[in-house]
């Protein structure tokens, strides 16, 4: 039987913004965990970590030095957003965010396609088309099943996709002057709905920190 939600907040370490250690930084995997906690109304204590100068206390609890990590109250710090969100679902089953297995990989290649296109210096390398192909596939799925990946109800796959799509929207507009085509109306609506959710607004990094975070990768 799943545990009932504890009144004690869970502790979660996420990336702090570069140059602004008191606000969340540009990590889509951290935001995914925070979104999951918010959507399930799980109380949490946020610990912001400056990844450019990792504090000793953080390296002691997590020698790999990666975020996000979470402590559910037993003193054990759990890494990896896939693992963390699965445990949250198990410990706090209501409301359910379970995505049907057949939809679990919808949009899963968007992040890698986006990063390749963002870093590309060659307009003929096919990276833009590869990203467009992913968006067309998402459009077709949402047309048949939307407004969310699993229909009317938001689920885990949406909470994984939302931060990645926001990073994509902000950084491609800034560095490439690129945006998701207007004719992909289901995708446009999907992004609008996700980005306007209270949980998303509360957990999202500011655009300027997102751009600053991606700049070194773009110019590498």
Image (cartoon, helix red, strand yellow):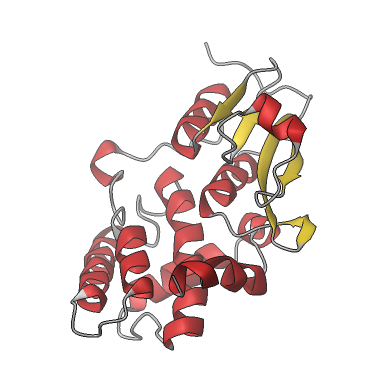
* Rendered location of residue 194, percent (x, y): 52, 63
* Rendered location of residue 78, percent (x, y): 57, 26
34 relative position to 156: left or right: right
Residue situated furthest top in the rendering: 1
Residue at image coords 63%, 73%: 207
Residue 57 visible in rendering:
yes
* Rendered location of residue 34, percent (x, y): 62, 45
88 relative position to 10: left or right: left
- Nearer-the-camera pick, 82 or 137: 82
- Nearer-the-camera pick, 37 or 20: 20
Q: Looking at the image, is 9 positioned above or below residue 212?
A: above
Residue at image coords 26%, 77%: 128
- Nearer-the-camera pick, 159 or 112: 112
Residue at image coords 57%, 22%: 91
Q: Looking at the image, is 128 positioned above or below residue 99?
A: below
98 relative position to 85: left or right: left
Q: Looking at the image, is 44 positioned above or below residue 38?
A: above
Q: Looking at the image, is 134 positioned above or below residue 79?
A: below
Residue at image coords 71%, 45%: 49
Residue 92 visible in rendering:
no
| Residue 137 occupies quadrant | bottom left
Count the numbered circles shown: 0
Residue situated furthest bottom in the rendering: 177
Image quarter (top left, top right, bottom left or bottom right) of the C terminus:
bottom left
| Residue 19 occupies quadrant | bottom right
């Amino acid at each position: 039987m799943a545990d009932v939600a504890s009144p004690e907040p869970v502790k979660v370490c996420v990336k702090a913004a570069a140059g602004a250690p008191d606000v969340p930084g540009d990590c889509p995997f951290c935001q995914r965990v925070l979104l999951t906690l918010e959507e399930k109304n799980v109380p949490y204590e946020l610990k912001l970590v400056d990844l450019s100068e990792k504090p000793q206390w953080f390296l002691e609890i997590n020698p790999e030095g990666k975020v996000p990590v979470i402590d559910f109250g037993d003193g054990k710090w759990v890494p990896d957003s896939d693992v963390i969100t699965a445990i949250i679902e198990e410990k706090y089953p209501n409301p359910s965010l379970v995505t049907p297995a057949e939809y679990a990989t919808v949009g899963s290649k968007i992040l890698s396609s986006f990063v390749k296109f963002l870093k590309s210096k060659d307009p003929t390398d096919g990276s833009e088309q590869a990203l467009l192909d992913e968006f067309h596939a998402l459009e077709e799925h949402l047309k048949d099943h939307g407004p969310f990946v699993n229909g009317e109800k938001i689920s885990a796959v949406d909470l994984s996709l939302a931060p990645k799509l926001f990073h994509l929207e902000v950084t491609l507009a800034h560095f490439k002057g690129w945006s998701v085509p207007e004719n992909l109306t289901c995708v446009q609506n999907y992004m609008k709905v996700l980005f306007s959710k209270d949980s998303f607004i509360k957990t999202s990094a500011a655009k300027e920190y997102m751009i600053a975070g991606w700049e070194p990768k773009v110019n590498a």
